[in-house]
Amino acid sequence: MSVIRMVLQEMWHRKVNFVLAVLAVTTAVAFSVAFFTTAKASERETARLMLSMGYNVHIIARDADAGGFLITGIPNRTMPADYVDKLAAQRSISYNHLLATLEGKMNWQGMDIVLTGIAPEVCPPGQKKPPMTFQVDPGTVYVGHRVAERLQVKEGETISVGGKDMKVKKCLAESGGLDDMRMQCSLQDAQEILNQPGRITGIKAVDCLCFEKGDPVATLRKEIGDILPEAQVLQVKALANARAKQRQMIHNIFALMLPFVVAACGVWIGVLAVMNVRDRQQEIGLLRALGYDAGAVCLLFLGKAVLVGLAGAVAGFLLGTSLGLTYGPGVFEITAKAMIRWEPSLLVFACILAPLFAIVASFVPTLIAVTYDPATTLREE
């Protein structure tokens, strides 16, 4: 009788042991597949939620008063608007978003306001990311809550700002901060109204150094300083640290959970393999007595481990993907549709790694079976 046939017959004879072993591999594969299926969505979701906290890097002119900027939020010096283009052309800068702005105080209809011109947001070369803030079309303006409430500004009406007619695109909701006293328009319109052609007051950015060691500010200042020597870099450390810690926490949770699940399933398979060896001692002794060598006995157990691994890989892939597709959208509401999908490559990896995993877990019991003395079994019988 061939070894393969004996493996199949043994699996049929001991169905419960086989099913439990397959269930162990299925559990390990399902958790792994569900983890990798939703990992991208998790990281993207966390990043998107952290982006709602705002930009954490400010680039202003070197001769601007940094202290005054920290107090008012408005730089007192301008710099060339093409600075943002120089940064955007670089692939070696650790950033995810760039937003050029021109800000200035002005009196409008007897009320002191802040006029902010916003350029289209720029992403690193070759990367397409959704903008962090709304895009302002030329000829339109977004009015802060306090300004709109006090001066009775309505959406859709046309107002004159600095001698330029503009349509009110939206009256913003209350923010409880400076944005309530702000009017936001396109960068071109702001340059015309403030009489600052080709100038900006600052560039807002989001660094992507969450998982980097060392001082992120020093890294950014070196990278940006080599390109824009006439600019200075300020980082909102509390915001940057909160974003970094949150993303690292999510990353570490997944990295911690998966090895525990895989290790537990490996012990589960190993225990089942030991029980299988114990139950088949007499059978092993008879096979050795009938002339089956150690290699045949080894193939008998490892062959079963391979079949267990393959069955568990397919079942685990289907279960893990189904769990990710079913429950992922409820957890990752923003990015689930774009990031959670069937990943056929994971099935290939599962069909390779799961049998190896089952073989490793069954290795010690297999050694016990191979080294078992048939004379001892026959004597006991």
Image (tube, helix red, strand yellow):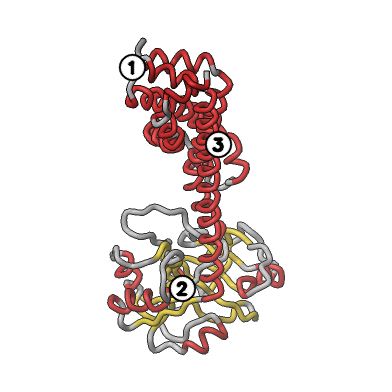
With 113 as the anchor, is 299 left or right in this view?
A: left
The answer to which of marks 2 and 1 sits earlier in the sequence is: 2
Viewer-nearest residue: 378 or 148: 378
The answer to which of marks 1 and 3 sits earlier in the sequence is: 3
- Which label sits on residue 320? none
Amino acid type for the residue under numbered disc 3: Trp
Residue 202: x and y in percent read 43, 76
* Residue at the top extreme of this rendering: 1
Amino acid type for the residue under numbered disc 2: Val
Viewer-nearest residue: 374 or 79: 374
Residue pointed to by mark 2: 57
Look at the image and tell me in which quarter the N terminus lies: top left
For the point 50% across and 39% down, the residue is 266
Residue pointed to by mark 1: 291
Residue pointed to by mark 3: 268
For the point 42% across and 76% down, the residue is 215
Q: Secondary structure at mark 1?
A: loop
Residue 334: x and y in percent read 56, 47
How many neighbours does mark 1 have within 10 angstroms: few (below 14), some (14-19), or many (20 or more)? few
